[in-house]
Amino acid sequence: MLSVVSVRISDIYVPISRRKTLDPRKVRDLAEDILINGQKTPIRLRRDGDRFVLLEGLHRLHALSALGEENIDGFVVKGRLH
């Protein structure tokens, strides 16, 4: 079972392919919801040396960053071996 960990936002790398899908309106709406209800769903990350790579939760990551948060809740999963 995965456990939720708190990760520094500055330690998260967002791949270029993910950055292209960023919708500022969705980030704004999520930030407003997070102000009222808090972060409901953790993001998904994988470890890559000293940093983490974002797998899922781009808009949540940017919403919390826009709110001035330094940490985000996430699940750290193991990367797939090909």
Image: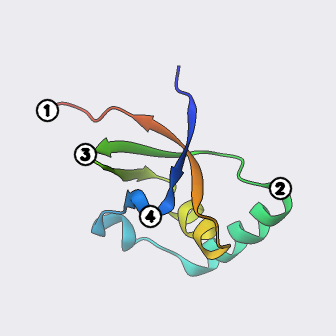
Q: Which residue sits at x=75%, y=61%?
A: 34
Q: CA distance from mark 4 to mark 3?
A: 14 Å
Mark 1 residue element: loop
Furthest residue in direction right, as rendered:
36
**Amino acid type shown at disc 1:** His
Horizontal arrangement in the rendering, residue 79 relative to residue 31 (left or right)? left
Mark 4 residue element: helix
Q: Where is mark 2, residue-wise?
A: 37
Q: CA distance from mark 2 to mark 4?
A: 23 Å
Q: Which residue sits at x=29%, y=69%?
A: 16
Image x and y of residue 19, in percent: 38, 71
Q: Counting residues from the N terminus, which is met first, the one under dot 2 or under dot 3?
A: 2
Q: Residues within 10 Å of mark 3 (few under 14, many from 20)?
A: few
User: Considering depth in this image, is 68 or 53 the residue closer to the camera?
Assistant: 68
Do tag 2 and tag 3 residues touch (Cβ < 8 Å)? no
Vertical comparison of 17 with 38: above or below = below
Q: CA distance from mark 1 to mark 3?
A: 19 Å
Q: Residues within 10 Å of mark 1 (few under 14, many from 20)?
A: few
Mark 3 residue element: loop
Q: Where is mark 1, residue-wise?
A: 82
Closer to the eye: label 4 or 1: 4
Q: CA distance from mark 4 to mark 1?
A: 28 Å
Q: CA distance from mark 2 to mark 3?
A: 33 Å
Q: Counting residues from the N terminus, which is met first, the one under dot 4 or under dot 1?
A: 4
- Among the 4 quarters of the image, the one containing residue 41: top right
Numbered circle sitting on residue 40 = none
Vertical comparison of 30 with 72: above or below = below
Q: Which residue sits at x=54%, y=62%?
A: 61
User: Considering depth in this image, is 19 or 64 the residue closer to the camera?
Assistant: 64
Q: Residues within 10 Å of mark 4 (few under 14, many from 20)?
A: few
Q: Counting residues from the N terminus, which is met first, the one under dot 2 or under dot 4?
A: 4
Q: Counting residues from the N terminus, which is met first, the one under dot 1 or under dot 3?
A: 3
